[in-house]
Image: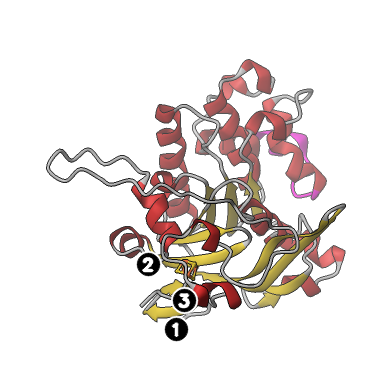
Amino acid sequence: MAQPLLEVKNLKKYFKTKKGTLHAVDDVSFTVEQGKTLGVVGESGCGKSTTGRTILRLLEPTSGQVFFEGKDIFSLSPRQMRAMRKEMQIIFQDPYASLNPRKTVGEIIAMPLVLNKIITDPRKREERVLELMETVGLAERFINTYPHELDGGRRQRIGIARALAMEPKFIVCDEPVSALDVSIQAQILNLLTTLQKQFGLTYIFITHDLSVVHHFSDDIAVMYLGQLVEKAPTAELFEKPLHPYTQALLSAIPIPDIDHPQKRIILRGELASPINPKPGCRFAPRCNYASEKCMNKTPELREVSPGHFVACALAE
Ligand code: SF4
């Protein structure tokens, strides 16, 4: 089997708080093949964004390893990591907050080229900026415009153009359409799909909304309270979800079918705390199938059929 572009092994990211240690990402492992998209899904606070940022070393890990094209990126020096960042980029959820309001569209997109001294000639740099704007569907006339003068969709296109400036191989898309209207969401998803084909990009696509990644991801990883609870090819996850949490998430997606009305699984019980978590399954307080067995030992993520991983004591 070909080497995956990205391999995450036992990644942990903890934060010290006044109440104890917050286990934001707790022993997460997965791989992403070159040219594919892994959707990472879960409720707010499940650790999905922290996972994405720790992979890029925007946050330093507590422990674990991340291999990018076989290189252990946590062992790289700051200088080596700066070079590696050209290959690994991020698109943020709130394009407005991530764009400098005092810079024009052209200046924002040119910034990575300036900082990394990629194109030093201002005229050539402007040509490259215009090329990037065309690639993401931003009209040339916006080059001297400020972000606040544009709508959310166009602002997100600036963020995408900036991420593409360094010709990366891998992009973490951190809730890139969550702040946008549904019609604009579809345009941005289509653009990301086109760019993936055009440049052979590999994505991690982080979202709280499973329906967004249904047609966009090759595989889906479901996170709950800092842990990966299920990962499978997208079609299989939608047809045969095995973890009770994934089943509940899927039941919340409205499907218009009068003959087979959907039964929504309502999650009851308290969300366990990610601070100093107790042993046992973290989903147990909300799980309809929880038993004694689930309380003592944290279920391990195991492969129950080819490519389908689940962390539940009763998965079979
Ligand atoms: Fe539910 Fe037990 Fe499975 Fe956890 S391990 S999801 S509590 S059945």
| Gap in angstroms between the C-alphas marked 2 and 3 | 11 Å
Question: What residue is pinned by disc 3?
Answer: 313
Q: Could you tell whether 171 is left or right of 235 in the image? A: right
**Callout 2 touching callout 3 (CB < 8 Å):** no
The residue labelled by disc 1 is: 1
- Quarter of the image with the C terminus is bottom left
Which SS class for mark 1? loop
Mark 3 neighbour density, 10 Å: few (under 14) some (14–19) many (20 or more): some
In the image, residue 124 sits, relative to residue 86, either above or below, namely above
The residue to which callout 2 is attached is: 242
The tally of labels here is 3
Q: Amino acid at mark 2?
A: Leu
Left or right, 228 with reference to 85:
left
141 is higher (above) or lower (below) than 270: above
Residue closest to the eye, 45 or 97: 45
Residue 215 visible in the shown view:
no
- Residue 249: horizontal and vertical position, in percent? 42, 51
Front residue (pair 231, 172) = 231
In space, the residues marked 1 and 3 are separated at their CA atoms by 29 Å
In the rendered structure, which amino acid carries the disc numbered 3?
Ala
Tell me where residue 188 appears, x and y as whole percent: 47, 37
Report the residue at 76% width, 35% height from top.
Answer: 122
Which of 120/224 is in front? 224
- The mark that comes first in sequence, 2 or 3, is 2
Farthest residue toward the left? 259
- Magenta segment boundaries in residue numbering: 116-127
Residue 277, horizontal then vertical, whole percent: 70, 64
Label 3 beta carbon less than 8 Å to ligand 1: yes
